[in-house]
Each structure stands twice: as structure tokens, then as C-alpha cells.
Image: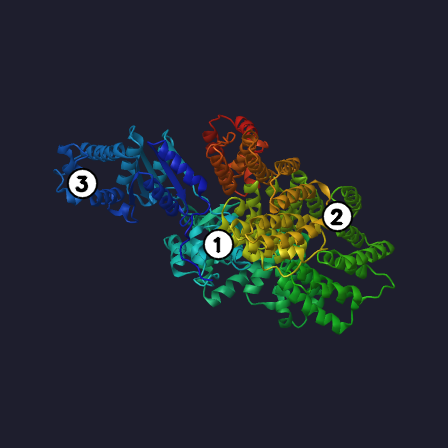
Amino acid sequence: MSARSVSPILVGRTAELQMLERALGDAPGAVLIGGEAGVGKTRLLRHFTERAAAGGARVLVGGCLELGSDGLPFAPFTAVLRGLVREIGIDGVAGLLPRSAAAAGLARLLPEFGEPDGEATGGEDRARLFELVLTLLERLAERSPTVLVIEDAHWADQSTRDLLTFLVRNAGAAPLLIVVTFRSDELHRAHPLRRSLAELDRVERVRRTELERLTRGEVAELVRGLLDGEPRAGLVEQVWERSEGNPLFVEALLARDGTLASTLPDSLRDLLLAAVQRLPEETQEVLRLASAGGTHIEHALLAAVSGIDDTALARVLRPAVEANVLVVDGDGYAFRHALIREALHDDLLPGEHTRLHTRYAEALENDPGLVPASRLWVELAHHWYSAHDPTWALVSAWRAAGDARKAVAYAECLAMLSRVLELWDKVPDAAERIGAERHDVMEQAVQAAELAGEHELGIKLATAALREMEALGDDARCAALLEQRGRMGYQLARPDYLDDLRAAAARLPAEPPSMVRARALASLASFAQHLSAVDEARSAAQESLAIARRVGDATAEINALLTLFCVDIDYDDGLAQLAEIERLIHRSSDQRHLLRIAVLRSHFLEGAGRHAEAVEVAARGVELARELGLYRTQGTFLTINLAEPLVSLGRWDEALTRLRQAMDQDPPPSIRTSLHVLAGEVALARGDLEEAERQLAPAREIMWRKAQDFFAMLRLESALRLAQGRPAEALEAVAGVLDNPGLPDDARYAWPVLVNGAGACSELSDRAEAAGWMERIEKRAADLAVRGPLQKAHRITFTAKAALAHGRRDAAAWDAAAAAWERVNEPYPQAKSLAHAAKAALLAGDRDGALPRLRRAAALAERLQAAPLLERIAELSRSAGLEPAPERRPPGLTPRELEVLRLVAQGRTNREIAAALFISAKTVSVHVSNILAKLDVPTRGQAAALARELKLV
């Protein structure tokens, strides 16, 4: 996969783009846009000005030059004027101004207008020039809205700053928008632009915004745009960590082959070090020293390592702080961007590198209080390793792993244990130094890898550890490792994962009963029931339960009970059984069982049609996973259980946000399938067939026959082929359900695919072939159980679709389906059922009965932004001479604004909304302002009331 050098899409700047467009609509006025180098100011303006020009506005752009303060006054205005002359000619420009003033005044900015009228002798000539520029811009704006862009104002000379301030303060009524960009990281305390910005901030029509770095999810979106596809596993995390969300750095760090650049590109290195190279040499020297200490370093530690006293160190570092190379961070300092530290550190000579890290390690050994206790061992591990001292690097890494485990930082624990294993052969007495054997370290690393979601590495470690345990003849530890390897194989969707679990259970005899065998059987039962081995799962769970109760193993007992619950879920009356298990869990000390309860309870509630309750349970589970350090594994799995009911409820934008967040965590294949399916179904419902196809492709790579994944993928594939007008191919997808009866939770996942199959039969041109398919489909449906209101709604819908396939349109059957979907609060299938009912009524000559159905269907589809369904409803209405007149809709709210509005209606603060949507509180504030303006209401309370009236919440 190759990477573009520049992203074709604008990512993460929707609110700022809307703010600029609103400012143009409200012109005259000005917008001041700050942000660090590379954060995307120019990209944002390019998108804005292209859209403004397409809408009929005139765009004038001028940039300040880095040498502007050294003798090139009015540089951006000279550039603007030169561009205008190229566009409309000298005469055209002169024609906009008083004849007597044009040439003489503008000649001071552009030689093409001749010689200035004498030497400028004082303030009057300067004032006339300023008035002339303002008149020119206002005359242009009177003809069409005009946008004046002044870029890189941090390099502006005094004359440019003065003229800019004059224009902003004195712009009249013409629609003139002045946009100014500047690098906020260049504005040291004495920078002259600071004073100008402070003055302009006080002008009523001026808006100011600071572009923030991209969030992790936005970086993932940017990487996908650069690669034009899904990135390989782990790439987004690597790019995010190194770029820290700076878009330019993201683009620079991706090599042309789509991998992460191993070294910083020269252009990026030059940009990063430019500010450093302007600092005094003694400051640069200390910065090089600081670069070995990490992105954050305590003042006391830097003083100890440098040998400079506090007062002198503060003096030496002050220029770096004023130049925004360093920022004060608590009791120490942080590099403004981690890549600045990386560039400095990479420039160290080999001898310097070793010497500096040795000094850091020795300083920390001598005075551990120089850093917080939680960081001591990981810092020592880093510095001794970088100083090429394997003995103390190994000892420190072992201690750091223990600290990380206590802090539930499993990825960091794995990294430190991997370091111990890497150094083991270089330290002859390693076991004596840490009090553990190599195979003990490997066992701990396997556990950390599983908890961190690093399953590929975990399987390799488990395989290596098994070889050592086999040599020791330790069956119990071999069984435990086989069990762990099997669980991780399941997460990677490896079809042979059950072999390991079966081997683990068989490794130990039934007598005497043991905790290890009980847990191995519990795992076998838990994972076997996902496939067709239901009887094996039930038998293993029952045996595990019996052993667990004999040996008093609460963990195995809970796992066995949960598996027995899952083997045959009763969606009518299953919560009582789950509540009993939950009481047992609360008496245990392992909180991870609460995550599995959250998974099962939310899964049950969604399957029972209790979508809103499922959302609440899953959302709490996701937060618990974060607290336990298990978000990448259990948290992303729970995100499926959160997104699925959000999709059911028609809260599609919220669901997509959650799905993106989960995909950004690079989840294992066992989780990714459902994430892709749900995202694909929303795209399909909204008419984006290309995106639906893109989401289907990775979902089809599934390597097993687990109903929850396999049937869900077939559900998307059959629906997509129908939308593409390919019913025969839709039926080929449906065949996967017809040929695989008896899987766990069969009915829940089979019913919607059979509904699609009946729909495909109604569209198949070969009626004999359709009849053959319908016979198979109806036979499969007849064998399916129907448990809970959700499955009842599917069966009622199937009955209506089957009648349609047999050539009968039954309005009453479709009304029954619409009512069933309304009872479980699923607006999308309700709207589709109402549209079918309306069509049946029209064909029966009941135009009066069709109209209210069409209106209700249109209102639901409009709220969901389900464009294809809306078009079908409109076409049906037009063909019958009806006008459905949908209910009142939100006026022009974007999908993100709808998300924010729903959360406002729930009474959440800006900070709470920001946390829920993973955006900044400042961005939320912009969204809320947009919402109030578009809804034409003055308060959040009135916006919430209107949201409820529009049935958005």
C-alpha cells in the first residue's frame, strides 16, 4: 500500500470551517486563526476559500515573509494587489478608486502604478495609503463578498500590522471578511504581534480561534485518507504517538510505502529544529542534555544531571521557554512537541548518547526522589538500556514491570517484561538478580500480552514458554499456557483455537480435581459455544462447575455459569438467571467478571429489544474497561454492544463515533468483523454503497462460522446486493444461513438474513427460481425459535416479505410489522414497513390510508438521514399524486451537531459532551453556538425542548 504525501481530505476542522462560513455570512468582520506550525491553518483556509469562491466570493491572499521585519513593509498587501492586477488589470483596479488618488497612492505598494507622488513626509501620506487600501477592498466587496487572507502574521512587519489593525477597525458595511493566520508557537512574550492581537480581540466583529492538534480518531481518519484504505495493525497508534496529532507531522511520518518512517524526513527535522538553532549556544547545549531525559523532565533532575545550579539553569532555559521550544510543565519542563526532542536526541553523537543516559541513571540512583516514585524504575530501565548497561537495565525493567502491573498498565508491563527477556542472555546471573527464572518471566509476559490485547506476540511467547514447561514436565503450567494460547487464538479468529483449549482440558486428569482443570474446562466451554460445538460446551461447563464447587474456585464457577447461560439464551425470561450470577460475582474479588456481565447483560437486552437499557449497560461497561486498563480488548468488544443498540435506536451518528473510536484501538479480528458490519449497515441505509462495500470487504475475511459474526456479515452482504439491484447474489449470501443451522443464538442472527432472502425472491425475475429459494427459506424459518419481542418483529416482517415474494401485498401485514418495530423502538425498519404498507394501500386504491403512512415514514427517514428510503417514499408519493409533507425537521444541522444536541438534551455540560465525543470543550462550545443559531433559540434548555419535539431524543 502506497501513501500520498498530502491528504485529499480535510480532517477534524468541521467546526472551524463552519465558523468561517458563518463569519463570511455575517461580514464585515475578521477572524484570527492561531496554531502551531503544521497544525493545518493553510489547509483549512484552502478549503474555506475554495468553497467561498465557488459561492461567488472574491478571494485575495497575501502572505507575510520571514524577512518582513527586516525591510519589506506591506509585503502581504503588495502580493494581494499584484494578484488583483493580474486578474482585472491596472485600469480595473484604478477604476475602483478616486482618479486623483489611485496611481499616486498605490504606487507606494506596487511599482506597476508608477512613481509615488513625492517622498512620504509624515503621517498624512500613511493615512491616505491606509484609506486607499480600505476603499479598494470595500469597493470590491460591494460588487461581491470579499475574503482577504493574510497568512503568517507572526512574520508581519510593523507597517503591515498597523494597516491590518486599521482595516479591521474601520471596515464599513460592505461584506468584507479579513482572515489572519499566525503561528502561536512563534509568539514569545515580547513578540510585537501579541499587542496587535490583544487590540483586535477587543473589536466587536472579530472572532479568534486556536486550531488544536487532531484527536487520535482524527489521526486515524487522516491516515486512512493518506493510504486510501485501512492501515496495517498498529500503524495508527505509532503515528499518533510520534505526531501527537499534528497533521503535517502525520503526513511527513508516513513513508511512501505506507509504513512509518524510521527516521525523521529532513524537511520535518529542519522545521522542528529551526527555533532551537536561533537560541543561544548554552541553551542549545542544555536542550540536548534535556532531550535524553524524555518529553517531560523535572527541573531538579535536569539541574542534577547538568551540574548547573537552579538560578543559572532557569536563566539558561528562559530563552527556550520564551521561544516556545520548552513549556513549563508543573515542576519541570516539556518539549512543545515530542518530535523536537526526538530530532535533538537523534543529533547526539554515539559517545554523547551513552554518556548522557549514564548521567541520568546515576543521578536517579543517587537520589530517587528526583522523579515521582511511579516513574522511578521505568526511567532507570530506559536510561540504563540507552547507556548499554544490560545488568542494571534488566533489573530496572523487572521492577518497572511490577509497578506497571499494579497500575493495570498491561501494555507497559509487557514492554518491560519483553525487555527483560531481550537482555536475559546478556546477564549471566539474571535469575539471581531478579529472583525469578526465565520461564517465570515468560509466563508473566504471556498474561500481560493477553490483557494488553497483543495476541500475536502473546501466542509467540506462549509457544516459547510451552517448550520450556514441557522440558520441566510441569503439566499444570502447560495446561494454563495452552488455555491462554487458545483464548488468544480465538481473538485472532484462528479456526484451530479450540485444539489448544481441548488440549489444555485433557492435560490434567479428572481426579484429583484441580483449579487449573476447572478453568481450562471453563474456557473450553466459553469459547466452544461460539461455534457449533454446543453440546461440547454444555458438557465442559457442567464439569467445570462441578470441579469449581469442589475446590472452591469462584472464577471457574462464574465462567461456567455464564457459559451455561449463553448456550441457550432465553430472550423472554433470562435476566433472572443472569442476576443470580451477578450476585455471585459481587461476592468475588475479581472485577473483570463485571466486564463479562456487562457484555452478556447488554447482549441480552439488545437481543430482547430493550435497546435503551442495552446502551446504558454497555456504556458503563466501556468505562469500567478503561478503569481496569482493558479498553483495547474488553472495551472494544463492549463497544459492539454499545453501537448495536445505538444503530437500532436510529442514533446512527453516535454509533459511528463509537465504532471509529473502537477501530482506532486496532482491535483483534474477533472484534473487528462486527464493527465493520455495523458501520457498513449505517452507510448502506444512508445511500453510501461504496462505503458499505468498503466495510464489507474486511468483514468477509472472517474464518469461522460464529453466528454473531458470520450471519451478521451475510446480513450486510445480502442487503447491499439488494440495494445494488443484484438479488441473485443476495440469495447466494443468504445461502450461508440456510446451510448452517443450529449455531448458538441462531434465531437472533438468522431472522434478519431470512427477511433479506424473502425480499430478494420478490425481486428475482425468474419466478421458478424464486419459488425454489422461497421453499428453502420458509423451511429454515419454520425451524427457528422466536424468543422475545425483537425476534417476533423479525418474524412478522418475514411473513409480510414472504407474502410479497408470493405476489401478495398485504397492508395489514406491513402495518403489523411497523407496529412491532415501534414497540421495540427501531425507527428504520418501522419506516420501511410503513412505506410497504402505504404502497399496498395505494395498490388497493386506498389513497387516504396511504398518506398518513407515507408522512410518518418520511418523518422517520428524514430524521435518520436515510436518503434511499426517503427517495423511495418521495417517488411513491409522486406516482400517486400525493405529497407526504414530512414532519418538522432540524434546519441544516450537521451529523456532529445532531450528536451534540442529543447530549445537550440529556442535560450534559460542554465538558461532559467533550469527553463523550472525544473532542475539546472549546469545539463543543462552537457546536452549541451553531445549534442555537440554526434552531433560532436563545438557550440550551429551549434547544433541548425543540430536540424532543423533533423526536431527536
Amino acid under disc 3: Arg
Q: Give residue 287's quadrant in the image.
A: bottom left
Give the residue at mark 2: 569
Disc 2 residue crowd, few under 14, some 14–19, many 20+, Cα 10 Å: some
Camera-side residue of 621 and 279: 621
How far apart are labels 2 and 3 at the CA level?
84 Å
Does the image show residue 858?
A: yes
Q: Which one is in front in this view, the residue at disc 2 or the one at disc 3?
A: 2
SS assignment at label 2 = loop
Amino acid under disc 2: Ile
Answer left or right for 524 relative to 291. Answer: right
Residue 218: x and y in percent read: 49, 48
SS assignment at label 1 = helix
Q: Is residue 608 above or below residue 294?
A: above
Q: Which comes before the other along the chain, label 2 or label 3?
A: 3
**Which residue occupies 15% across, 42% down?**
113
Answer left or right for 693 relative to 56. Answer: right
Amino acid under disc 1: Arg
Give the residue at mark 3: 108
How far apart are labels 1 and 3 at the CA level?
49 Å
Answer left or right for 853 relative to 628. Answer: left
Q: Which comes before the other along the chain, label 1 or label 3?
A: 3
Disc 3 residue crowd, few under 14, some 14–19, many 20+, Cα 10 Å: many
Q: Give residue 623's quadrant in the image.
A: top right
Answer left or right for 30 relative to 507. Answer: left
Residue 224 shows which numbered tag? 1
Quadrant where the C terminus sits is top right
Q: Give residue 365's quadrant in the image.
A: bottom right
